[in-house]
Amino acid sequence: MGRRIAIIGAGPSGLAVAKALALEPKVSKLFSAIDVYERHPKAGGLWYYTGLKNHVTPIVPSPNNDESGEIASSDAKTSEQRFVSPMYDHLETNIPKEMMKFHGIPFPDDCETFPTRSEVVQYLENYTKTIPQSVNFTFNTNVTSLTKKTDPDQWELIYQDVFKDDESRTKLYDDVILAQGHFDYPFIPEVEGLKDWATKDKNSITHAKYFNNVEAYRGKNVLIIGNSASGIDIATQCITSAKSVTMSSCSESPFKDVIISHVAQIGKISRYDFDHDRSVISEDGTKLSGIDTVIFCTGYLYKIPFLKSYQVDSCDKSLLSDGSQLLNLYKQIFYIPDPSLALMAVPQLVIPFPFAECQAQYVARVLSRRVSLPSETEMNKSYQSELKEKGPGRSFHAMKGISDAEYCNQLFDLISGTEKDGFVAEYWDDARKGLRSSCGSLKGERLKLIVRHADNLKKEGKPFRLLRGEFNPTD
């Protein structure tokens, strides 16, 4: 009997690893089951967006795993109402389509350089059709518990139909791949006065995950916390309808050359004071009053609530920390104390689709036993070396510059000699690395155009809409 594989999540990384497994030589003998569990009605992961975000709110603050989560209203019944995507109405990719694509499957010619979210989800639907039918997809399914049993040595997976959450089913697997994504639990830092503010006006504190469009901010004074991609994007959109927009930042933006008209700047907030004219004070003493809404664009926590094993261990073998980092991972994929657990797409600042394929080709070969993992001692040595180089916390998973390309090519080295059979991702040659290194500047120029577009919409009294048909990266 072949090994039974469970993949949790049918987003880009779940699809990539499902395809790679299904294309392994002698797959029918190797694997008796390749089962993919997805909460939504179809594939796409975070790209599956419906706009139904009024049924869920974040716990404020949410500084770590123990003090974080979402509050769902009693009328949140469907998967679209319960499991909110961080996408929003007017969103395009931050990555050019030539870099974002899966290997050998280009985006349609009529897609512009930076595709819209709807074009991406259609692309993913088409990609799903290329996955062999030996993969079994189970949609509208929420995994509620995942526990490693020792007798026998198996994973117990418990799941529910999202429409029948009073009924649970159980299946056993030899290996589990977590591809559920890491953009689910908002990180909202704990700052003096913030909890009091949220208690007195809970609807005025939110996170980028719950942003749909600018309509909710019409005529309001908006404070945005964070100046990375989502902060800049949401601030730009809000200037078309808000009374005022202020951005708080504690470090230099990756798009420092993008100046957003009509957006004031303030430093890191040290105190929130609801009772004194809904004001905040920054670390340098600057005060801002009359704030109607605060939008946190501060990222997400690494949290896996359904995982009941390996969360906390007294022998330094925990998988999860406070939410800023995942621990004890070899090549940021395999859980070292028990490599029957693998995690996809953990690193940040990467080109996600081709990155997932590079990880997938390695995972598939390890699970099929065509490639062997090093000993636990050697994997620990590799992990500790990486930890020493990058440091603990959020920086551990950040792949700055083109380090994601270097990482992917290291994975190619690990599958050397097996490339003639099975799925093979696209190698990052010098030309591809060059294109990778230009992604930030291309998006920066694009954002400058979007800012001018938003300025024009503001002058015309129109809400934000996507800019289409007015960008040529060779200009």
Image (cartoon, helix red, strand yellow):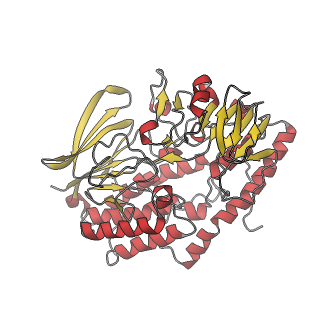
Left or right of 303: which side holds 47? Answer: right
> Is residue 464 visible from the viewing direction of this image?
no
- Can residue 165 be seen here? The reply is yes
In this orientation, which residue lies closer to the viewer: 305 or 117? 305
Q: Residue at x 78, y 50 (%)?
A: 260
Choose top left, top right, bottom left or bottom right for residue 246.
top right
| Foreground of the two, 132 or 209 | 209
Tell me if residue 377 comes above or below residue 264 in the rendering: below
Residue 409 pos. (x, y %): 45, 73
Position of residue 330 measured from the top left corner of the image (x, y, whole percent): 35, 64
- Which residue is the extreme one toward the left? 151
Q: Quadrant of the N terminus?
A: bottom left
User: How far across and how far down the image is residue 54, in percent?
Assistant: 57, 28
Residue at the spot 62% in from the left edge and 37% down from the top edge:
211
The C terminus sits in image quarter: bottom right
Q: Quarter-wise, where is residue 157 in the image?
A: top left
Nearest to the observer: residue 183 or residue 11: 183
